[in-house]
Amino acid sequence: MDAKTLQARLLELIRRTSCELPPDVIRAVDKGWRREKPGTNAKYAFGVIRDNIKLAAGKSQPLCQDTGTIICDVARPDWVSERAFRAAFEKAVDEATRVGYLRQNSVDSITGRNSGNNLGPGSPVIHFHETTAKALTARLMLKGGGCENVGAQYSLPDTGLGAGRDLEGVRRCVLDAVNKAQGKGCGPGVLGVCIGGDRATGYVASKEALLRPLDDVHADPVLAKLERRLLDEANTLGIGPMGFGGATTLLGVKITARNRVPASYFVSVSYMCWAYRRDGFQLSAAGKIAKWLYD
């Protein structure tokens, strides 16, 4: 596959991710809308969200004015190098910004200067993994600043929460994070949670958890049970969409775990807003998109 074809396929991945929510997310939003009582602020908020989803998809315009941090997870076969993929992806990001699929959203942290094309140190974020598969698999997530700001990390034990080094302690931390976020993360949100790891790997893994489909079930029955319980309990807090009150504070909870050293027990919580922008594809060496991962 030539570089221009790879760039074109990645540009389409960016467009879809920025402008079209995957079906699993739309189903969760519709379920939340049905759950809320007529005439309430929560019902109204969901109505605006649903209209937003339809308008953005119909016009190929971003779902949110904050197109967020660009995070791409790549399972790379031998036929494409990291250097070639990064070059094509950066060109696709530049083009996506120029045509309006992405907002000019990358700022130099020292000078405050906007790069104008979403490129710069650490932008975009690309995680590479080698694969023996013939196809390249790329998953893209656009994570807005509002939801990123209400992420949280806890070091257990936490005496203030009465949280020990066990799953009950994890549960207390996650619910505390949801309660503190209130409507500031553009809820209803989705949580990615990592149990363990260190401060850096825990946050990375918590974001990787957000790449799972909303309606899947964790392979570990213990964590599957904890995911269901946290979703149910968070939705009894009464925070609701945008913090307006209601029965739908979260759309989903996805948990993963990483080994830790005995001295540390971290719980890392990444919050994703209702504009749950992630998509992905499998791409053949000939440049054909063999499969969209969330359809």
Image (cartoon, rainbow, N blue to C red):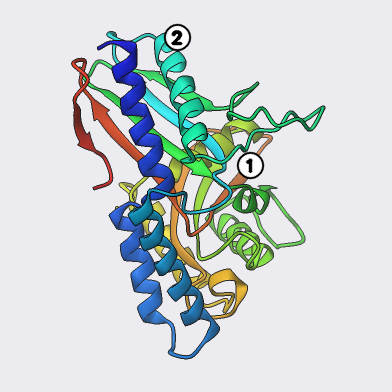
Q: Which mark is residue 265?
A: 1
> Is 57 on the left or on the right of 259, as rendered?
left
Q: Amino acid at mark 1?
A: Tyr
Badge 1 element: loop
Q: Amino acid at mark 2?
A: Arg
Please report contact status of discs 2 and 1: CB closer than 8 Å, yes or no. Answer: no
Residue drawn at point x = 36 percent, y = 62 percent: 54
Farthest residue to the right: give it.
111
Q: Position of residue 182 (x, y in %)?
A: 65, 68
Identify which residue, 279 or 265, lies in the foreground.
Answer: 279
Residue drawn at point x = 38 percent, y = 30 percent: 11
Q: Position of residue 267 (x, y in %)?
A: 60, 46
Whether residue 259 is visible to the viewer of this picture, yes or no, is yes
Q: Which mark is residue 83?
A: 2
Q: Position of residue 31 (x, y in %)?
A: 34, 72
Q: Position of residue 265 (x, y in %)?
A: 63, 41
Q: Residues within 10 Å of mark 2 (few under 14, many from 20)?
A: few
Badge 2 element: helix
Whichever of labels 2 and 1 marks the residue nearer the N terminus, that label is 2
Residue drawn at point x = 44 percent, y = 63 percent: 52
Which image quarter holds the N terminus?
Answer: top left
Whether residue 215 is visible to the viewer of this picture, yes or no, is no
Identify which residue, 45 or 180, lies in the foreground.
Answer: 45
